[in-house]
Amino acid sequence: MPDDLERMWADLLPIGRTAGGGYRRQPWTGAETEMREWFGEQARARGLRLVGDGVGNTVAWWDAGAGPGVLSGSHLDSVVDGGAYDGPLGVVSALAALDRLRAEGFEPVRPLGVGFFVEEEGSRFGRACLGSRLATGSLAWSEARGLRDDDGVRLGDLVPGLEADRSRVLGGVAAFVELHVEQGRGLVHLDAPVGLASGIWPHGRWRLRFTGRADHAGSTRMEDRADPMLTFASTALAADEQARLHGARATVGRVAAAPGVTNAIPGSVTAWLDARAGSADVLDALVGAVLAQAEGRAARDGTRVEVEAESVSGPVTFDAGLAGLLADGRPLLASQAGHDAGVLAAAGIPTAMLLVRNPSGVSHAPEESAEAEDCRHGVAALTETLRRLAGPGWQP
Ligand code: GLV
Ligand code: MN
Ligand code: MN
């Protein structure tokens, strides 16, 4: 990695690291607060002007030139036991790019910002890209304030909220560029260190609650049971089958049985379905088929299924003009992972994404990685991108 990037990376590496080598940087916890404080220190050390909103979305502005500015960044939170790169690589790369532009005496014609959005992963309050959705107004604070985490903590009791300053971090943003570690092996197969995202697959999260009848594991005859675990298990298999049939993706990565007793049939099982597809029609068909199979199985099991869509994102195609400007012969890849860049693009902000090769392709797990040399290419690509967008040759 370049020295400056390496130094920043070394600062962040211990924060929220678990004994297993993964990261727990859940929003508004000690580790994530430390990450955000680190960002504030970096901004102050560079003399950047810090702007934050009532949920913690933050931008550090280099107040150069005039008019609306160019923003780059990503997020600092992680999934539970995630990797080091998903999010932070984009933030440290943006700071490193800004350092390079300054070191070479570049004079921007418009402001240049580095920022991050909170709760991108939705690992605490269940809504993916919570911070950027609130910042763009695609999710209302009146709806978000009542969200509760697993311990029952209400979001509205944790942060002041966005009533008065909803667009504070995005007012005056003419374009957004997010650099991100690739979350697959596309660039490995293409033998390229850096690529461009063409767009993001539509995707969403659905909370499924299966209810049955709690009873004794020994004395309840098999034919007398209403076991929601069976309805859940059959639904998880249906998700796998339907995703394969539709050429799409479906995952049940989180499940909780209540009361969670070894020697009792559970009274209820709550599970979260994550589904993604190349088009909204295919996604609808996939989720519809899984839910139909769940209902069919519930009728056999004597159980019930309730479904709540927690967050659903439509397809995103990134700005063609920006993609052309950034192309430089780089390969274009569709992203099956969601990003704040997708939320900003959907809100009408011209947006682009640079992806950095990930040798294993693993993400949302401790093995997520990127080679130092590829990170160097990523910073160089981002530096060049910001030079173009903050230079006189590009007009918002
Ligand atoms: C975010 O990384 C997501 O795609 O879930
Ligand atoms: Mn992620
Ligand atoms: Mn991410």
Image (spheres, helix red, strand yellow):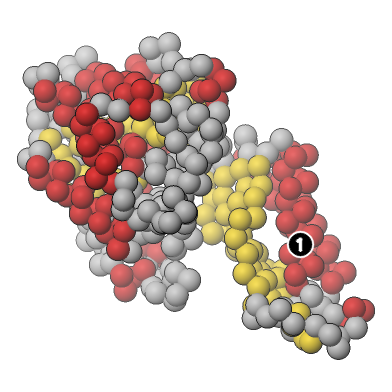
Nearest the eye: 113 or 66: 113
Tag 1 secondary structure: helix
Q: Foreground residue, 16 or 243?
A: 16
**Left or right relative to 287: residue 381:** left
Q: Is residue 213 left or right of residue 205?
A: right
**The N terminus sits in image quarter:** top left
Q: Picture quarter containing residue 296?
A: bottom right
Q: Nearer the viewer, residue 101 or 345?
A: 101
Q: Please report the residue visible at 14 percent of the width from the left and 48 percent of the height from the top.
A: 41
What residue is shown at x 30% (from left), y 63% (from top)?
30
Compared to residue 120, the image places residue 279 above or below, namely above
Q: Residue furthest top?
A: 329
Decide: few, some or many residues near mark 1? Use Cα within 10 Å; few <14, some 14-19, many ≥20.
Answer: some
**Above or below — where is 340 with respect to 187?**
below
- Locate residue 150, reporting x and y percent: 48, 71
Tell me, yes or no, if residue 67 can be seen here: no
Return the x and y of residue 353 as percentages of the image width and height. Answer: 40, 30
Amino acid identity at mark 1:
Ala
Quadrant containing the C terminus in the rendered view: top left
Q: Residue at x 10, y 38 (%)?
A: 46
Residue 63 in view in this figure: yes
Q: Where is mark 1, residue-wise? A: 233
Picture quadrant where residue 263 is located: bottom right
Residue occupying the far front of the picture:
19
User: Which residue is painted at 78% across and 46% down in the image?
Assistant: 241
381 relative position to 360: left or right: left
Q: Position of residue 310 (x, y in %)?
A: 54, 59
